[in-house]
Amino acid sequence: MAVIADHCPEITVKVVDLNADRIAAWNDPDLTRLPVYEPGLDAVVSRARGRNLHFTTEVNAAIAAADMVFLSVNTPTKTRGVGAGQASDLRWIEACTRQVALAARGHTIVVEKSTLPVRTAETVQTILSAGQQGDDGNAKSFSVLSNPEFLAEGTAITDLESPDRVLIGGQDADALEALAGVYSHWVPTERILRTNLWSSELSKLTANAFLAQRVSSINSIAALCEATGADVKEVARAIGTDSRIGSRFLKSGPGFGGSCFQKDILNLVYLCLHYGLVEVAEYWEQVVSLNNWQQQRIAKLVVQRLFNTVAGKRIALFGFAFKADTNDTRESPAIRIAKDLLEEGAQLSIYDPKVSAEQVQRDLGVPPAEGEACWQQSLDPVQACKGADAVLILTEWSQFNALDWHAIASAMRRPAWLFDTRAVADIKAARAAGLQVWTVGEG
Ligand code: UGA
C-alpha cells in the first residue's frame, strides 16, 4: 500500500487496522520503529505518510470513503476443526468482508490481497451480495478481484518496484481495468496479467508450491552430495545454467521457513483432497515432509558430531529469522532446530542481528535462563561463542560471510565445530582458526 501511495500521489491510501498499537507504530515519527523491518520501507513511508498515505483505526469511515478496498489480513493454517493442519483459517477474511459489506457506500471494488484458497472469492461475493440487500437505506454494489502478492520478505520494496508480473483476476472488466490503472503508474503494461478469479487464486498457491519444491529438491540433493562427495553448490551451478531450469532458488539450507510456503502447500493439498485428487495431494505433501526431514536431520547431525550428546554443552546459534534481511521468524527452521537441541539438553546462545529476545521466547515457548536445556540471547557473535562447543549458522545474514574466526575460535572450547547450514561462512578461515567444519551439501 505504501508503494502504491508513493507512485500514485493523486490516490489517497488509508491503511486501517483495529489494533491501535500497531497503527500507532506505523505512525511513529521514528522510522526505525515501524512494526515491520524491511530494507527501503522507511524511505517509502517517509515520502508518502501524511501526504496521501494514512494509517488509522477509523475503519468504517475509510471503507465508506473508498472506491477500492484491499483485504490484506492473516490467513493462517487452521489448528482445529475440519481441515485442521491444512486448510486456511478464513475467520478474519470473513469478518473483514462483513465489515466492508456494512460500511461501504456506492460502488466498491473489493480486492483479495491475502493469499486465499481457491474459490474464496465466491464466499466474499456471497457475503457482499447479502450486504447489498442490507437495510441501511444506502444503495451499494461490489465487484470482487483477486490480486495476489508475490513479494518476498527482505526484498519487498524492490519486488514491488519492479515486479516480474502483477496478477489481477476477475470477471468485471471495468473493475479489472481500474486496478490495472493503479499499477500502470509504474509497472509496464505487458507485466500486468489479467486472468479469471480462480486462475489468479490458484496461481498464487502454485507459484509458492513450485518455489518451495525447488528448495526441497535441492535440499534432497544436498544430502546425497554429502554422502557421495559431490558439492551441492557445484551441482546447483551446473544445473542452474540450463536455461530451462534457471539458477534461482537452488540454495540448499536448513529447510524453507516463512509464513507462506508451508501454509500454501498445505492449502493446495487440502484443495486436492477436497476434489478427490489423492495422488496429487500426496505429491505436494512430500515437499513439506522433505522440509521437516531436513530440519530434523540438521539437529541430529549436530548431536552426532558432538559425540552423541549435547547435554549441558553450549551451542551458539547464528541467525534465528527464517531468512536474511527480515526480523520475521514465522516457521523459521531455527525454531525447530533449537527446540530439538534444547530437548537434547543443550545450552543455546542465540545471536540474530534483528530478532528480539521476546520473539525468541514466544517461538521457543520458554523464557531465557542459564543452564542445561536453556537458551540465552547474545548481542555479539564472539560473546555468543564463549565456552561453546559449536557454532550453528541458520540464517544467511551477510555479516556471517566475514566473521572473525580467530576471535570466535579462541572463545570456544576444543574440539570446536562450525555447522554452516547456509554455506555462507569463510570455511577456510574457520578451519585455519582450528575449527572442524560441516557445511550443508558438502559435509
Ligand atoms: C515467498 C515467495 O518467494 C514470494 O514470491 C511470495 O509472495 C511470498 O512467499 C508470500 O507468499 O507472501 P518469502 O516467504 O518472503 O516469499 O521468502 P523466500 O525468499 O521465498 O524464502 C522462503 C524460504 O525458502 C526461506 O526460509 C529461505 O531461506 C528459503 N530458501 C529460499 C532456501 O532455502 N533456498 C533458496 O534457494 C531460496
Image (cartoon, grey):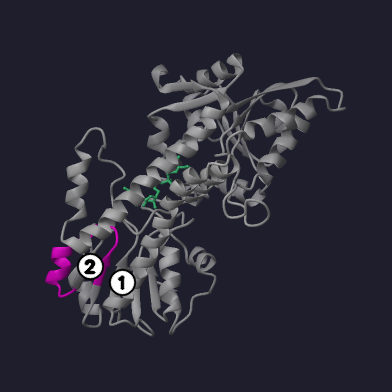
At 76% across and 26% down in the image, what residue appears?
129
Which tag, 1 or 2, sits closer to the chain's start? 1
Evaluate whether residue 29 shows in this view.
no
Proximity of marks 1 and 2: CB atoms separated by less than 8 Å: yes
- Measure how far apart labels 1 and 2 are at the Cα level: 10 Å
Mark number, residue 400: none
Q: Give the percent coordinates (x, y) of residue 146.
A: 57, 29
Task: Give the residue pinned by disc 1.
Answer: 301
| Residue 346 vertical placement versus 149 (above, below) | below
Q: Give the percent coordinates (x, y) of residue 236.
A: 22, 47
Tell me where residue 322 sits by quadrant: bottom left
189 left or right, relative to 118: left
At 41% across and 79% down in the image, what residue appears?
344
Looking at the rendered image, the quarter that the C terminus falls into is bottom left
Q: Give the percent coordinates (x, y) of residue 254.
A: 35, 59
190 left or right, relative to 278: left
Give the class, few, some or many, for how many residues have Cα within 10 Å of label 1's Cα (few <14, many ≥20). Answer: few
User: Residue type at mark 1?
Assistant: Leu
Residue 431 shown in magenta:
yes
Task: Give the residue pinned by disc 2.
Answer: 438
Question: 167 or 292, which is in the foreground?
Answer: 292
Q: Give the percent coordinates (x, y) of residue 406.
A: 17, 72
| Residue 440 vertical placement versus 143 (above, below) | below
Question: Label 2's element?
Answer: strand
